[in-house]
Image (cartoon, rainbow, N blue to C red):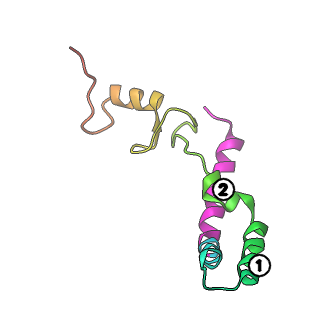
Amino acid sequence: MAKKSMVEREVKRARLVKQYAAKRAALKATIEDQNLPMEERFKATLKLAKLPRNSSPTRLHNRCQLTGRPHAYYRKLKLSRIMLRELASFGQIPGMVKSSW
């Protein structure tokens, strides 16, 4: 089980990413627009830098929904390998069965 503080930190980051997504997209579009004057694009770059660092989507880290484990994460199921195996053994994941040969 991951520390509660780490899980809460990721929740906070996800909230910030969602909150600033439109503003970041607008500033990035301004920066990449070659038709605008250089000063305006530079000002947009400074505004983008002033936004909170945790509002950047690259700072998000995938974590298991049940345990908060950051490693061995399956994106499709949003679970770690440990919880995936445990739930599959109990038959709680539809269509997944333990293989044996």
How far apart in space, not on screen, are marks 1 and 2 (Cα)?
A: 25 Å
Answer whether residue 37 is magenta in the image.
Answer: no
Q: Quadrant of residue 26?
A: bottom right
Taking 89 as reference, is 57 left or right? right
Q: Where residue 22 sits: x, y (%)?
A: 59, 75
Q: Residue 31, labelled with which disc?
A: none
Relative to residue 33, is residue 1 depicted above or below?
A: above
The nearer-to-camera label among 1 and 2 is 1
Q: Nearer the viewer, residue 70 or 67?
A: 70
- Prevalent SS, magenta region: helix
Residue drawn at x 70%, y 85% is 37
Q: Residue furthest left?
A: 101
Q: Where residue 90 sits: x, y (%)?
A: 34, 28
Residue drawn at x 76%, y 66% is 49
Work out which quarter of the rendered image holds the C terminus and state it: top left
For label 2, the residue is: 13
Q: Amino acid at mark 1?
A: Lys
Q: Nearer the viewer, residue 5 or 76?
A: 76
Q: For mark 2, give the secondary structure.
A: helix
Residue drawn at x 61%, y 51% is 60
Answer whether residue 13 is magenta in the image.
Answer: yes
Please give the range of residues in magenta: 1-22
| Marks 1 and 2 in Cβ contact (< 8 Å) | no
Q: Residue furthest top?
A: 101
**Sequence-wise first label, 1 or 2:** 2
Q: Nearer the viewer, residue 87 or 18?
A: 18
For label 1, the residue is: 43
Q: Amino acid at mark 2?
A: Arg
Relative to residue 38, is residue 95 depicted above or below?
A: above
Residue drawn at x 45%, y 43% is 78
Q: Where residue 11 sits: x, y (%)?
A: 63, 53
How many numbered marks does the figure carry? 2
